[in-house]
Image (cartoon, rainbow, N blue to C red):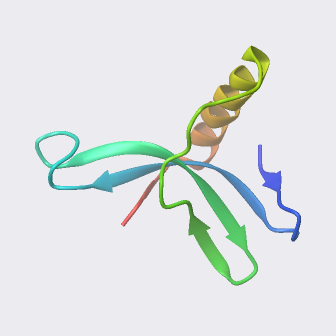
Amino acid sequence: MDKERSDGATWHYQLMKHKTPHLGDDEGIYYAIHEYHEMKDGQAWTMDPVEVIGESVNDVIWSLKAMLHDIQRHGVKDYD
């Protein structure tokens, strides 16, 4: 479910593996969903994980379905 930005670049939800010493499991590993942008000059992702919010229940359901679809399609990438 790639989404198109106004500048023609695309983005999708991306599950990312974080390694942070004081968060997550004993090794500091946890997973979070980010927006992942594919642009002409490279790739980038949001610094902070995305929130699941919407103006209606259907908005939230759509977001969750899009996130699950994108995780299945794009897998997991390292945040670092």
Which residue of the protein is positioned furthest toward the left in this rendering? 26
Coordinates of residue 58 in the picture (x, y in percent): 78, 18
The residue positioned 15% from the left and 55% from the top of the image is: 21
In the drawing, does residue 4 fall left or right of residue 57?
Answer: right
Q: Residue furthest top?
A: 57
Residue shown at the point (64%, 43%) measured from the top left: 73
In the visual, does 2 lie left or right of 47? right
- Foreground residue, 69 or 36? 36
Q: Position of residue 25 (x, y in %)?
A: 17, 39
- Up-down: is 2 above or below 24? below
- Residue at screen point 76% across, 25% down: 55
| 75 or 13: nearer the viewer | 13
Query: How many numbered discs sit on the rendered protein?
Result: 0
Looking at this view, name the residue that lies furthest to the front.
55
In the displayed structure, does residue 73 sit left or right of residue 10? left
Compared to residue 22, the image places residue 44 above or below, namely below
Quadrant of the drawing holding the C terminus: bottom left
Q: Residue at x 60, y 32 (%)?
A: 52
Toward which corner of the image does residue 71 lie, by quadrant? Answer: top right
Percent position of residue 34, x then y: 54, 50
Q: Quadrant of the N terminus?
A: top right
The location of residue 48, given as percent across then percent down, is 48, 54
